[in-house]
Image (spheres, rainbow, N blue to C red):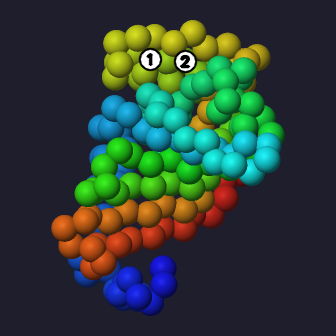
């Protein structure tokens, strides 16, 4: 971040823990997913989803604006609703086609939302986002709590 924000680098004192971030991701009901339209304009929409096995999972119809955007450019930003306890993920939305992962997603989704989505390994309507970067901070103690994680790409 720019120097004007007052964020100290090289210290972890007061920063947000990864355990806090994963707990917030797991407990959230609504998530915002931002994609890019073909002309580059942003598109953001709320979705239901899951933090599962180190990735954010969500579904969308391939014919939806999100689905069409993801087919063209799978880069996404995912964030929670709060501006006071911020969690933001950046990554690439990958279609989930493995039957076991889809069944695990559907079971966890049903447990969380009381609705079991239909999942089809041949339909690109469930996506997993493994974060490439994550950001978190608490408004009450910003900039001290501002934290960034960078992750190695997974195979």
Question: What x and y, as percent, mark residue 115?
Answer: 41, 11
Q: Residue at x 31, y 55 (%)?
A: 83
Q: Name the residue under label 2.
A: 103
Q: Residue at x 27, y 74 (%)?
A: 142
Q: Is mark 2 on a helix, strand or loop?
A: helix
Between the residue at mark 1 and the residue at mark 2, the CA separation in whole angstroms equals 6 Å
Q: Residue at x 57, y 55 (%)?
A: 90
In the image shown, does 69 or 112 lie closer to the viewer? 69
Q: Residues within 10 Å of mark 1 (few under 14, many from 20)?
A: some
In the image shown, does 31 or 92 lie closer to the viewer? 31
Q: In this view, does 132 lie above or below 106?
A: below
In the image shown, does 26 or 79 lie closer to the viewer? 79
Residue 132 marker:
none
Q: Residue at x 72, y 37 (%)?
A: 69
Q: Name the residue under label 1.
A: 107
Q: Residues within 10 Å of mark 2 (few under 14, many from 20)?
A: some
How many discs appear? 2
Question: What x and y, as percent, mark residue 10?
Answer: 40, 88
Question: What x and y, as percent, mark residue 66?
Answer: 65, 33
Whether residues under marks 1 and 2 lie with C-beta atoms below 8 angstroms apart, the answer is yes
């Amino acid at each position: 971040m720019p120097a004007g924000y007052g964020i100290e680098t090289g210290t972890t004192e007061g920063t947000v823990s990864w355990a806090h971030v994963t707990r917030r991701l797991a407990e959230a009901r609504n998530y915002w997913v931002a994609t890019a339209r073909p002309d580059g304009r942003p598109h953001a929409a709320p979705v239901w989803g899951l933090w599962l096995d180190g990735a954010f999972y969500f579904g969308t119809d391939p014919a939806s604006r999100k689905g069409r955007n993801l087919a063209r450019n799978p880069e996404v930003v995912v964030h929670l609703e709060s501006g006071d306890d911020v969690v933001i993920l950046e990554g690439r939305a990958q279609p989930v086609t493995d039957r076991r992962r889809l069944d695990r997603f559907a079971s966890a989704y049903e447990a969380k939302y009381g609705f079991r989505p239909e999942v089809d390994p041949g339909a690109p309507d469930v996506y997993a986002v493994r974060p490439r970067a994550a950001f978190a901070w608490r408004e009450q103690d910003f900039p001290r709590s501002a934290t960034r994680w960078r992750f190695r790409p997974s195979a």
